[in-house]
Image: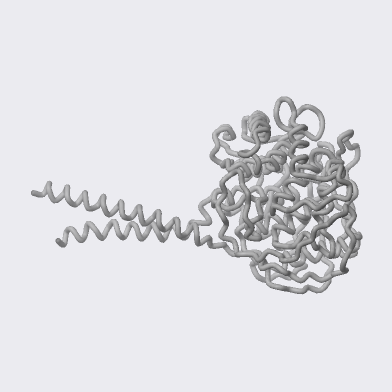
Amino acid sequence: MQRKSKFLVLPIVVAIFLSIISVGSVSTSLKGREEYNATGKYLANQSPIVGSIGGEWEVLGLARSDLNIDKSYFEKYQNNVVNTLVEKNGVLSTAKYTEYSRVILSLTSIGSDVTNVGGYNLLTYLSDFNKVKRQGINGPIWALIALDSNNYEIPTNENPSNQTTRENLIEYIISKELSNGGWALTGNTPDPDITAMAITSLAKYYNSNEEVKKSVDSAITALTKMQNSSGEFSSFGTVNSESTSQVIVALCSLGINPDTDKRFIKNGKSPVDVLLSYYVGNGFSHTKGSNYNQMATEQCFYGLVAYYRLCNNKNFLYNMTDVYEKPYDPTVTEATTTKPVITKPTTTHKATTTNPTKTTKNTEVVYTTGSYNSVTENNTNPTYNNTNNYQPNDNSVNSMVNNNRDNSSDSSEETVAETTSNTESTTVIGTTTSTTESTTVTNNSNNENKTTNVITRSKDYKDVFINLIMIFVIGVLVVVLGTLIMMIKKKSDK
């Protein structure tokens, strides 16, 4: 009897040990976790503005991550959006309607009401299909992603013939696919960035629309051909990190694991491996051997966020219905997230014009959702240092490539090539800052005087629970195995 007890104690101890190890490694077992944490911490210590660099993509990535970000970071961003809209009379751009799509996505990620931002309904700007597609394929792609991010109802346009619908957005995107698969801003050679973005926009409809499925399947095949023997992707002749990130996001939108799918593993390297090879400490570079780049860092970070969300069975990066706990109509099976419950805004705004009027001049933000505590923040001027340490040799391709990557191309259906660098002036609470696509932003954490680490490792209790069940089952199997060994040994002793 004493010998039997000894045999039973050993497997039980082993099972308990495995359980302890498992609980501690739930959120750290995925590839690139150290780079992910360091990058998130660095970005969270910056002052977010309204813009394609240092703004919406940074905010969205942090909001959709599993890192605990200080709520003041998001409050500051929303204050900046409100003040920018008020100062510009609600007009972010008259040519690039991706400006509105981008802001809608970032505000949705933090649980804000996009139908009343400083008195403006941002969805209204996407209701005019002619204006949305004015800049070319980028416009419809990001309008569809933005509208589907929370299943938003498209406002009625004052001109019925220009009315945006999900159907005409989908039809337009599919119609622009190249005969050999994939999409491009111009020409007949598919580009990985635009192809990945188009796939992402259509992913929701993959299982319900045969034309979409045919188009996406062709594009996936095209992407595998665009990948080089080292597993990397290049845009306009330049191998870069951002293209790889866009491919990761696209694959995740379809439920395809970018780290294990054999079609995208070249010489033993997956897109995730390739992405991590650009890490330079606190962020990522645009090309191999170059320094930290802000745009690359933001895009690589949200690429990792998309990958981690897939691995943890959470809603896709741009499927933000979980933020409002609103039912989603997925065509790809997705599990619900364990993120804190958000109360959906009760106010409904249905605009009927493409020229929204300002209803209130509100330079202070009062949160109406449960994402962050109700806070009113005074008007402040964030500093944004445009110190450029981007290597000149990295910017050898024309500005159209960079426009492609920041999802805000100035291209039109007739002409997309530009001979000069696209520079746009972004107003942030009375301060005008010039931003270009080759700009690198330095960390402003010293100016913010942040003395505490705003990021702590998130505990996903659902994953812990599932993991414990698995370990328990393993423990039972170990006990059974130990018992069998004991019985065999007992017989042999006889």
Does residue 401 show up? Answer: yes
Residue at 56% in and 46% down: 333
Task: Tell me where residue 470 appears, x and y as whole percent.
Answer: 40, 53
User: Toward the viewer: 380 or 327?
Assistant: 327
Total marks placed: 0
Residue 342 left/right relative to 130: left
Q: Is residue 356 above or below residue 402?
A: below
Q: Is residue 326 above or below residue 284?
A: below
Does residue 237 show up? Answer: no
Residue found farthest to the top: 179
User: Toward the viewer: 21 or 277?
Assistant: 21
User: Toward the viewer: 328 or 453?
Assistant: 328
Residue at 38% in and 55% down: 471
In the rendered image, which quarter contains the N terminus? bottom left
Q: Is residue 27 above or below residue 221?
A: below
Residue 446 left/right relative to 23: right
Q: Quadrant of residue 218?
A: top right
Task: Tell me where residue 269 appears, x and y as whole percent.
Answer: 57, 37
Q: Quadrant of residue 246?
A: top right
Residue at 41% in and 58% down: 468
Task: Tell me where residue 255 appears, x and y as whole percent.
Answer: 58, 43
Task: Tell me where residue 160 appears, x and y as whole percent.
Answer: 86, 45
